[in-house]
Amino acid sequence: MWCDFGGVLTSPVANALGRVVAAAGVPAAVLLAAMEDVAAAHGLTGLGPLELGLLSERDWGDQMAAALAPEWTPAVDLGRMGEHWYAAHRAENALLARLVELSERGVRLGLLTNSIREWEPHREALLPGVSQVFESTINSFEAGVRKPDAAIYELAERALGRAGADCLLIDDTEENCVVAAGRGWSAIHHVSADATIAQLDAWLTGRLDRP
């Protein structure tokens, strides 16, 4: 079973993005357009240059400032965006507690996340020891591939030695779930902890009921 981090084990990603927008003092549409301009220069979208480790957070911040100039000057250093992003994050303790329980029962868990190298200390500070809950962790910036690229799901299958039909993904991005399902995985599109826990328990029960 594979679980995403941001937006699943934390409060929604939209909250974090809103915090960055507010701190920067730049309209959301303008900031997002600049992100896409920076990403497009590397043949990517969104936070791809960071999530694939192609740019350091410092270099990304400099490129963002250049993309926003001269019309806009961010009120904060976007080369330290992770500080503002994680300031808005809260741990999703109910779901994490359920995963810990499953791990203790022998369910094999993995963390499959589009992540940014410089944000690792923030993740650890938010959920100390969270990596110990998972048998395997696949960070996009280390793997050089990110969701929804099918290659990252293949990597996850190899990491736990399981075929897609034996894998489950919990993710807050629907596209990631769709691609996983296309490989034969089960997938839970995370919207709330209660709903995800209910779907997770149903999936586990279904597996136990198999002949």
Image (spheres, helix red, strand yellow):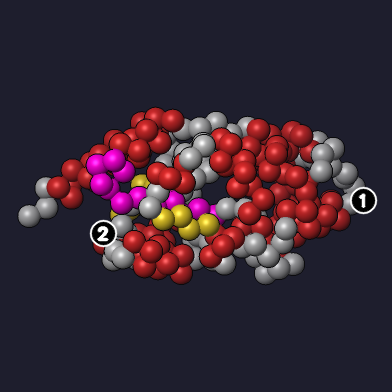
From this view, report whether residue 183 is shown above or below residue 86: below
**Extreme residue toward the right, this view:** 70
Query: As shown in the figure, which amino acid type bears the numbered disc 2?
Result: Asp
Q: Is 125 one of the magenta-colored residues?
A: no
From this view, report whether residue 141 is shown above or below residue 26: below
Which mark, residue 70? 1
One can see residue 171 in this view? no
Q: Quadrant of residue 177?
A: bottom left
One can see residue 63 in this view? yes
Of pointers 1 and 2, the one earlier in the residue sequence: 1
Is 143 displayed left or right of 58 in the figure? left
Closer to the camera in the image, 173 or 168: 168
Q: Which residue has dot 2 on it?
A: 166
Residues rendered magenta in the picture:
103-114
Is 163 displayed left or right of 44 in the figure? left
| Residue drawn at 75 percent across, 60 percent down | 38
Local crowd at mark 2 within 10 Å, few (<14), some, or many (≥20)?
few
Q: Position of residue 156 (x, y in %)?
A: 40, 62
| Residue drawn at 56 percent across, 62 percent down | 142
Query: As shown in the figure, which amino acid type bears the numbered disc 1?
Result: Pro
From this view, report whether residue 118 is shown above or below residue 179: above
